[in-house]
Structures are given as structure tokens and as C-alpha cells.
Image (tube, coloured by chain):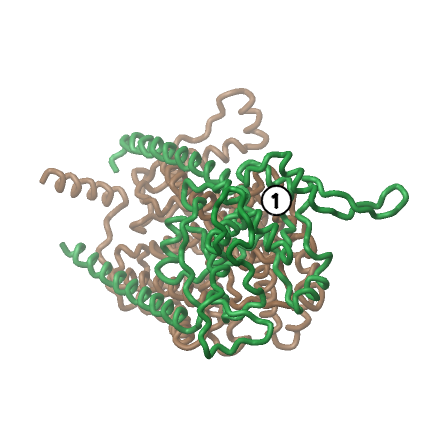
Amino acid sequence: MCKSINLSKTRQLILSLLGIFFLITSSSTFSIAAGEGVSKVKEQDWTFSGVFGYYDRAALQRGFQVYKEVCSSCHSMKYVYYRNLSEPGGPGFSEDEAKAIAAEFTVIDGPDASGDMFERNAVPSDKFVSPYDNEAMARMSNGGGLPPDLSLIAKARSTERGFPMWIVDLFTGYQEQGVDYVYALLNGYKDMPSDFPLQDGMNYNKYYPGNQIAMYNPLSVDIVEYADGTEATVENMSKDVATFLMWSAEPKLEARKKMGFKVIIFLSLLAGLLYFSKKKIWARLDH
Amino acid sequence: MSKISTYGKKYEPKSGVSRWFDERLPLPRLMHNSVNAFPTPRNLNYWYTFGGVLTFCLITQIITGVVLSMHYTANSELAFGSVEHIMRNVNYGWLIRYIHAVGASMFFLAVYVHIFRGLYYGSYKAPRELLWILGVVIYLLMTATAFMGYVLPWGQMSFWGATVITNLFSAIPVVGGTITEWLWGGFAVDNSTLNRFFSLHYLLPFMIFGVVILHIWSLHVTGNNNPIGISVKDEQDTIPFSPYYTVKDAFALVCFLILFAWFVFYNPNILGHSDNYIEANPLSTPAHIVPEWYLLPFYAILRAIPSKIGGVIFMFSAIAILFLLPWLDTSKIRSATFRPLYRQFFWIFLANCLVLGYLGSQNPEGGYLIASRICTAYYFIHFLVVFPLLGIIETPKPLPESITKSVLEKIKTKEIEENK
């Protein structure tokens, strides 16, 4: 009897402490959201999120097209190879298609037997050709700013999830905060308040920290022509290119999630067997 | 003690070969007596399985780390790219790297459970003071290893984390600047810093391994503490480690591995910071420089103190004070189960550490700064005031006569309840 009263006291104490903790954490979220003029990034519906996540091949191919025809005029992707385009878990181009895509680009190779550098067509084992020869040239062409490499951008950006979502994400496995941000950013060139002090050469974006971004609005309706008849709206193109950038950041995602499922099933069965073994062995004792 | 060690079937060489071995190097005898027959209190609960989990974590980190280092390049120009090479081109490189990165977090999760279990059941009290101190040494080495490991991918958080932490040493009067430059191997965090951190990151786990052996040796001299905290009195109170605790530990380990696998396969990046996927750039400082989650409470303490040297002193004292704990706690009763007041303060302390961790992730300004200062103050008050005082003013509950009696009583009450 005495023990149960004590227990409930302890429990009350823990609950009230947790209450205080959550109160602090939740109030802080409000202050972050209200403090700056940055809009909250919304969660999107991605095929690659969750336990059974996979990449939509058609979206990856369309997204690659958007990267190639729009983004790649300024942004490099130096960790991606043309061969990756035909590898399992990727956009699903055939090897010949990847070879043909690579052949559209030229790279400098050498030195040859006479000591000279020479130009040749890129092959699948080459990295994506960068738009600029070096950083200085990239800065010179972009008013001093350096367009970031996009290979990892979907993992190198994130969104402030706030309480309680950062705890929820631990249990749901939601890892799409970065790609949500990429999508939001590409759709964020609108609704500038009339009194916004925009600096010269900058562009207003709802989602960019500080709301001033050097990148001009890269997407407009029908800037690319999709071969599969998908309408080239800004929403569609940004969703496709964001999907492509998630793949480039995490090319082994499908293999990872598939293996994880097997591993967890195996471990659960093993845990079950061990649980009953433990029960049986301990049954020999008065415990 | 001698009574305990006679319990369990002692090692007896069965074949000619094992007898030959036993007379020259009694390694099988040592293994048998310390793993199979080791007499263990019969009432250990699942909080006591984390020692095994931690051994597993250390070995996993060493194996995955050795494989990663076969593909990694410790050079400031190449390090970031070599990690991406592992993720993209090395067969199952993504798996090995994610196990290693998530493994660090899991290691700390397990060590915190292990430490707080020790705090709850008074495992640091006589005769286990050295066992506890060796544990704190392991924890210190772990934080150093983890910090240096986090620098190796050479992302933005790697670089700036290293800059912040190494700069702390410059707060030391007179020799601070010299020490900092000596740590860097230059005048800023750069290639030479990365190289020495890689070397030390490879070395320290083996030092941890050495101290772990001492930790386990010490455990096998004093024997396990247990949830009711009273010492083993006779053979009845113990059971041989195998099969009882091998199977219990194995079950707990596999449950832990399910959580581990969840993070490796479905949430590998959530415990890290997205800025670390941006290559290190000494010219661009990230908006918020934060350490990994497991060091956040100490980061909060560091920033709670208005002076730099003061912050450094308090941060290191927060760990150093653990060394003194066996003598700060004046109560003769080990387990919090029989200490009604201490039990409540234990939970307050745990909550305080969690809040400190949260505050470490926020900017130190306004309400956060005030809260950090209050929580930092409480952290030290808990050790310097609460621990010494409670032992004097607290009236403990009556202790059971022996481990066996308490176990049997529990069964009885259970049976009565079931019969109702």
C-alpha cells in the first residue's frame, strides 16, 4: 500500500517535469516560427519516404532533364557519374542511353603520348561535367556568388521541424526535411511584401533564410518539354528535380530500405526465440 | 568474497591438450571462470544488460572503423570526397559508414543508460569505487574519440566544431595560445589537425578497449551490484553467469539491435546535422555550431558561464565531478529503491540533464540562457549539496535480509495476487 503511494508520487513528479520540459520546447518553436519572415516548409508526399520507399523512375528521368536543361547551366554535380544513371535504384536509363547522355559532353583528358592535353567525348565512367572550370570562374559568372554543388544538396539542407515533430521524426523515420526544402525553395519566388527591402541583384524567396537569395527564379512554365507528356508546371518540375536531387544525394536508398526490412524481420524473429529460450532457462530457478 | 568465487562449476581440463595448455597458459580457465561460471546476483534486471550492449558497440565501432579507414583519405582536400566515395562506389560502403555513424550515437545512448543505472542503484559505492572511476575514464575517452571522429568527414560541422572545441584551450592563461597551436599543428584547424585527429581517432578505441578490460576485471573482483544494493551473502544469492545471464543479455542485445537497425536503415541521418554534408569551408561559418546530441548537455554548461575560461572549467568539472561521486554520496544504502528522497532527486537530475541537452541545441540568449544557468547550477548542486546532505537527513526504508529472501518474497506476493 505504502509503496504504491510512493510510486504515484514519483510518477507525478516525472510527469510534471516532462510537462515543464515540453512547455519550454513548444514555446521555443513558436518564437522561431514567428521571429523571422521565413515561411514554414510543408511536408510533401514522396514515393521514397517511409519503410517501403522507392524512387519513381519516370520522375527521376524528368528531374534529370530539368537538371540538365536548367540547373546545370550554373550548378555542378561533382560526385555523380554518368554511369550512375543506368545503375540499379536510379533513374533506370539503359547503359546505351547513359553512354549517349555522356557523349553529349566533352572533357579534357591527357596528357597524351606527345605530352598534350586533348578534348574527348565524356564516357559513363566520367563525373558529371561541371559548368565552370574552377571556382573563380563560377564566382565571376554569378556576381561573386558560388552556386553550390548539387550532388548532396537534398541532405545538406534541412527544415526547422520544431516540437513535437523532431521527436515524431525519430519514430516515423521521416528524413525528407531537406528535399521538402528544395521543393519549397523552387516554389518560393512569390508573395513579396511591398515594403520588403530587397537588395540589388537579389531575389525574394519565401523560404530562403533572410528571404533574399542570389539565385534568380530558375523555373517557369514550359521551360522544359517533357517527352512523356507530363505538364511542365513549376510544381511538377520542382517536384521532379527535387526527386532527382534526393537520388543523387542518396543513390543507395532503395537497397538500404530493402535490406533494412529483412534485417529487422530477422532480428525480431531472433528476439522472439531468445525471449522464449530465456524464459525456459530461467524457469529452472525460483526467481 | 572468497566464498562467492568458489561457487559455480570450476574449470577442469577435460582433455590432454587442455591440461597441457592449462599448465602453461590458463587462458581457457580464465575465460571459463570469468564468463561461464562467474557467480552473478540472481536478481539483476534488464538495466544490467547494457554492459554487454556496450561491449558489442565498441567491437562494432572498431570493426566498421577499420574497414572505413581502408577507403578513407585523411587529407583536407580529399577527406570529404573520400567519404562520398565510400557512400557511392565502395561495395556496401553506405552500410558500413551508416553503422559507424549511427553506432556512435547508439554507443552513447547505451553508455548513458549504463551510467544512470549506476547512479540509481548506487553502483559507485564501496567496494566498487575503482570500477566506477574506470567507467568514467572510459566515458571521457569515448567523448574524445567521438569528437575526433566527427571531424574526419570534413564537413562544415566537423570543421567548425573542431574550431570551437580546440579554441577552448586558448582560454588557459599564459600557455593557452601555445597549447592550441600545438593541438592544431599550425595556426588554425587545417590539414595537420585532420591528420592527427585521424591518428588519435584510430588509437583511442584501443585504449578504451584496454580500460574496458580493467573495468571488467574490477567487476569480477567486487562482483556485480544489484537492484536492491545489498551484498551477496552466500551461494544461494548467486547464479552462474552462463546460461542465465548470457541468454538474458543476448535477448536484450537483439532488442537493442532492432533500434540500432531502425536508425541505420530508415533514419541514418536524423541524428547528425545536415550542414555536415557541406564540405568544410573556413571562410563561411554556419548559422549555428552545435555538437552531436550526446555532447549537448556539456555544450549548454560551457555556454551558460559568462567567461570563456569559466565555461571551460565548468564543462570539464561536470565530468570530473563524477570521479568524486563515491565520496560525495554519504549514504550507506546503495539502491535508490530504499532511499525515498534520493529516488526523487535522481529523476530530477535526469530531467535536468535532458533539459540541459535541449538547451545546448538552442542559441544561448534570453530565456534559454537563464534556463541554462539554472540547470547548470542544479547540476553541480546535485553533486555538491544533495548527495552529501541526503545521506545525513534521509531515513532509508528497511532493507531485505538477503537477495534470495527478497526474490522469494516477490514470488510469493505475485502468487497471492494471481490467486486472487
Give the farthest residue toward the top: B16
Q: Is residue A77 above or below residue B249?
A: below
Residue under the image location 47 percent in, 60 percent down? A187
- Chain represented in green: A
User: Circle 1 sits in a helix, a strand or a loop, which is it?
Assistant: helix
Q: Amino acid at mark 1?
A: Ile
The chain under label 1 reads: B
Query: Split into 4 quadrants, where in the image is the C terminus of chain A?
Result: top left
Q: Position of residue B403 (x, y in %)?
A: 28, 45
Query: Is B185 positioned to the left or the right of B329 in the image?
Result: right
Q: Position of residue B212 (x, y in %)?
A: 51, 47
Query: Is A200 positioned to the left or the right of B57 in the image?
Result: right
- Chain represented in brown: B
Res. B359 image quadrant: bottom left
How many other residues sit within 10 Å of disc 1, few (<14), some (14-19) or many (≥20)? Answer: many
Could you tell me if residue B310 is visible in this image?
Answer: yes
Number of dots carrying numbers: 1
Q: What residue would you read off at disc 1?
A: B86
Give the farthest residue toward the right: A114
Q: Position of residue A80 (x, y in %)?
A: 62, 46
Q: Nearer the viewer, residue B56 or B65?
A: B65
Residue under the image location 22 percent in, 57 percent down? B397
Give the farthest residue toward the left: B420
Q: Nearer the viewer, residue B94 or B234?
A: B94
Residue under the image location 46 percent in, 59 percent down? A184
